[in-house]
Amino acid sequence: MVRRCGWRAGLVCLALLGAAGPAWAGLDSELEAAAQALRSWDQPAADAAAERLMAMAPSDPAVLLAAGHAALLGGRYAEAVEQLQQAVHLGAGEGAAHLLELAKATEEETRDYEEHLTASGHFLIRHAPGIDAVMVPYAEQVLESAWTELTPIFGHQPAPPVRVEIYPRVEVLGAVSSLTVDEIKTSGTIALCKYNRLMITSPRDLVYGYGWADTLAHEFIHLLVTQKSRNTVPIWIHEGLAKYFEGYWRRGHVPALDRRSEDLLARALGDGSLISFEAMSPSMAKLPSQEATATAFAEVFTVIQYLERQAGPAVAARLVSAMGEGRSDRDAVAEVAGIPWGRFEPAWKGFLKEAGLRRMDDVFDQRLLFKGQDTEASELDAIKGEAARKFVWLGDRMRLSERWKAAAKEYAKASAEVGPDTPIVQSKLGFALLQLGRVDEAIAALEPPLSLYPSYMLLRVYLGDAYLRRGDYERAREHLEAAILNNPFDPEVHGHLAKALSALGREAEAQRERQAQELVNRR
């Protein structure tokens, strides 16, 4: 008879137990091999095991479940739906039903997606037809650099091509994953690495976009860690490694906490509200707010920072290899840190206290703003102080009627209230000054908050415009390229970057920007 159990308990649970006979000789061992390959996202081994199993027992529910799961991880969604439907019909259980729903949703949502295989063959980028195509050349550059820089650090190269899917809305990410849309928006988790693929939300679904380039590298690290460790690394180490190394796709990158993360960590350390490693499981996306998620990421970043100080640059490969070889996370961390586990957390907290973490006054809450949910009021709420919010509101009214001198005056009042480090205020002031042709004053308004909020989209856009007007084409290029890595859907940014690149003699790149501008203008 067949024992029913969840997929997570292992495919072999579904095998015929105690049923002797040559027809089933070796079936349970093949199911066990398939389960291990699927759990580890070892696609070649999973496909090979599924092929052998289908040759042995094509009508067995466990075999169909294994084959359907392999097809899902391999991106063959229609095939996965067909095989998982049969498995469910034959009684494969709740695990099969869950995978079937995921396969159905993914097949329906991505059926008409366009595909681009990168020149190296390392990545297959899939996206909805239309404007998201503008991301492809930039995504290819980021991903290929991530492959070059990160695979040696982790000591693993995935079987190509790695599938990358760009979803037009967070609702699609929710449909094809185990997350709800509320969890995505509450935590700010707008990308995942699950089911053997990288999944990100298009930055066009957010008001100002987000750091999608670092996010791609972050999710690629999750893939490397999962495959190399055979899926044995807990979430707190997973996220620590991904956060610490996500910027390494930029050659020469030196990891450091940004000032906002430093402030969050300093506050949590000071008032005893650090998030426990256990609370980070099963996913950062389950944390109650974007601030809690950011605090948790800051914590695990510093865990890897501390371990690297103890163990040297091979920390990533050593940690992941140790757990892949069967050691627990505690044993692996203790081995790398060179101290018993019981002393690790106090030593790490001591490291934090010695780091001189700085708090910020009047912190600007740079949270993700989602289209269709966040409004002008949501943005104004991030400004500290009623008087400053009133001045910005008045400035915005002047801006709507193109009364730029009056708008600049109101924004300057707001800046005087909150200081020169609030990016939303300074970007509005800088833009108004640019409209008045006061370029040097605009730069003076836009530069101060940049060191604290380097990913704030509008600062980059307006500084790029300002330096272009000044004739400083290299600095214009730097800011405009940074803007694109947050939001490539502003046609003016591509137009300005084309001018800067052309002035620098980089005509081929300038032409690419003109083409991108044309594509975005067609939306």
Image (spheres, helix red, strand yellow):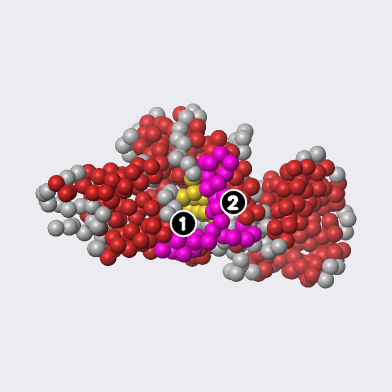
Q: Residue at x 85, y 64 (%)?
A: 404
User: Does residue 66 appear in this view?
Assistant: yes
Horizontal side, residue 30 vs residue 501: left or right: left
Image quadrant containing the C terminus: bottom right
In percent of width and height, residue 5 lies at: 23, 57
Q: How crowded is mark 1: few (under 14 residues within 10 Å), some or many (20 or more)?
A: many
Amino acid type, callout 2: Trp
The local secondary structure at tag 2 comes to helix
The one of 38 and 439 positioned closer to us in this rendering:
38
Tell me, yes or no, whether the highlighted magenta stretch contains residue 176. no
Per the image, the residue denoted by label 2 is 212
| In front of the other: 510 or 256 | 510
Say which of 43 and 59 sits in front. 59
Q: Answer with left or right where residue 183 lies relative to residue 461.
A: left
The residue range painted magenta reads: 103-132
The tag on residue 285 is: 1
Q: In this view, does 223 lie above or below 365?
A: above
Residue at position x 17%, y 45% from top?
25
Locate residue 99, reporting x and y percent: 36, 59
Amino acid type of the residue that numbered disc 1 sits on in the rendered structure: Ala
Is disc 1 in contact with disc 2, using a CB cutoff of under 8 Å?
A: no
In the image, residue 177 above or below residue 375: above
Which mark lies nearer to you, 1 or 2? 2
Whether residue 265 can be seen here: no
Give whichever of discs 1 and 2 has the lower sequence position.
Answer: 2
Local crowd size for mark 2, using a 10 Å CA cut-off: few (<14), some (14–19), many (≥20): many
User: Could you tell me which residue is drawn at 38 percent across and 57 percent down?
Assistant: 80
Residue sitting at x 33%, y 59%: 83
Q: Which secondary structure lies at badge 1? A: helix
Q: Which of 459 and 517 is in front in this view?
A: 517
Q: CA separation, marks 1 and 2? A: 17 Å
Q: In which quarter of the image is residue 401?
A: bottom right
